Image (spheres, rainbow, N blue to C red):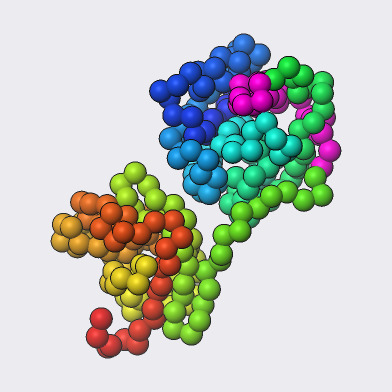
Amino acid sequence: MAKRQLVTLLTDFSTRDPYVAAMKGVLLRHCPRAEIIDITHEIAPQDVLSAAFVLAEATRSFPDGTLHVVVVDPGVGTDRRILAGDIGGQRFLCPDNGVITFVAESREQRELVVVSNSRYVPAATSRTFHGRDIFAPVAAHILNGVDLARLGPRPKAFTMLDVPRPVVAGEVLAGQIVYVDRFGNLVSNIPIAAVEPWCAALDAVRVSCDGREVGALQGTYDFVERGAALALVNSMGLIEVAVNGGSAAAVLDAGVGATVRLRREARGAEA
């Protein structure tokens, strides 16, 4: 039985246009054994930060050796580079625009190269559709066994997004919203792993978002009245601001970049 060749696709193409299907067609033409899994094609156009977040969170669930192809590429057709790498035992193929940021920060980088070897990069390409003309053929080469080192040289550096890290200032731990999901939940960059050493008594933490009080950390959405805002630790281990049965993004008029503050209060203090 042939070895499974898992490859995922993450784009901002949507599925209403022919672009995703064209990429899949090229992949299957060059690697018929490919098993293609869609992470999502609903990233907002050119939203590299959201793509970086989704890539890091979704790929944690895949087995080692999976190839993840990302085409959220505002710089398509320019001199921006394409990267291929083995990070944390999984392989990635993406534009060098920062989309690899959260993956690179949280996992061991084993190998990273700039895709430039003309033997594997097609010469005749569209300036506007590298997903079909470069990413898909190169992905097929990788799936067919081409070693990453043969694709090009190691970069001296690569692009990382400038996302501020959570900061502690006395009784306040501050971070920011980095992702808004389809429910309107506001996902912050504050991991519970950073909260617990700062305040072991989680029931003494009060949360605000963009200057508006949200309250204490809750266990899940239905722990507050319908329509009420709340904060919780989500399935990704991150502090999230939500509204039970509604959209926190709409109710709080907040989005990516909004400040989230956790305030540590003494036990017995009024909320």
Residue 151, quarter of picture: top right
Count of picture labels:
0
Q: Out of 210 and 2, give the one closest to the viewer.
A: 210
Residue 164, quarter of picture: bottom right
* Residue 206 highlighted magenta (yes or no): no
Left or right, 50 with respect to 243, comes to: right
* Residue 142 highlighted magenta (yes or no): yes
Question: Height in image: 49 above or below 252?
Answer: above
Q: Name the residue rendered at 54%, 30% in the picture.
A: 9
Residue 192, quarter of picture: bottom left
Q: Position of residue 184 (x, y in %)?
A: 32, 50
Question: Height in image: 153 above or below 239?
Answer: above
Q: Out of 206 and 78, give the one closest to the viewer.
A: 78
Q: Name the residue rendered at 82%, 21% in the picture.
A: 119
Residue 66 can be seen in this image: no
Q: Position of residue 87 (x, y in %)?
A: 67, 44
Give the magenta part as a residue range: 126-154
Residue at the outermost left position:
225
Q: Name the residue rendered at 29%, 72% in the picture.
A: 213
Q: Position of residue 77 (x, y in %)?
A: 67, 31
Question: Height in image: 203 above or below 176?
Answer: below
Task: Pick the quarter of the image with the C terminus.
Answer: bottom left
Q: Position of residue 48 (x, y in %)?
A: 55, 45
